[in-house]
Image (cartoon, rainbow, N blue to C red):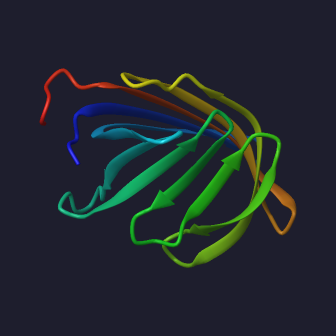
Amino acid sequence: MQENYMISIVGKQQADGETGEIRLETLGSYVQKGDHWYIVYKEYDEDNPNRYQTSILKVEKNDKVTLMRGNSSTRLILEKGKRHLCQYDTGYGTLMVGVFTSSFDSTLEPSGGRLQVRYTLDINSALSSNNEILITVKEAASQNV
């Protein structure tokens, strides 16, 4: 796949009274297959820039996204108004977490767009964190990057 889209991700997390934010801007692929959009990008290891994991976001219609990470067993399902039990690989082991999606807003179209999702994570049915992810996809200035 060609990496000819600029993908910007802002993730916010609130847990135990503290707030954190992660930002990532990278080139990746963005394709439509049937009713689904696929956003594919690489996350590079900070300590070793030659190592990376491929992340895939499968956006179904306007109310569900599935996040899959490379070789790990992470698979999070974010579906508006529903709670899913999902596997999350911490790098030290895999956890089963509950994911409840409270809001889902997508303006994805062939040239790009935005996806904003708000959700909570719980472990053993106890609230772990409130989360928000904002993903912006736009064509890169240079094609066939």
- Seen as rendered, the residue at the extreme front is 34
Q: Is residue 47 above or below residue 108?
A: below
Residue 37 placement, left or right of 2: right
Is 13 placed above or below 96 here?
above
Q: Residue at x 52, y 72 (%)?
A: 73
Say whether residue 144 is left or right of residue 139.
Answer: left
Please tell me which residue lies in front, 120 or 19.
120
Write down the quadrant of residue 111 in the picture.
top left
Task: Give the side of residue 100 with respect to residue 53, left or right.
Answer: right
Q: Residue at x 36, y 39 (%)?
A: 31
Please indicate whether residue 122 sits to the left or right of residue 14 in the image. right
Q: Nearer the viewer, residue 14 or 132?
A: 132
Give the image location of residue 39, x and y in percent.
Answer: 41, 42
Q: Position of residue 23 (x, y in %)?
A: 44, 36
Would you place residue 49 above or below residue 23 in this image? below
Residue 26 at what x, y percent from top left? Answer: 30, 38
Residue at image coords 22%, 62%: 48
* Quadrant of the image containing the C terminus: top left
| Residue 20: image location, x then y, percent | 59, 40
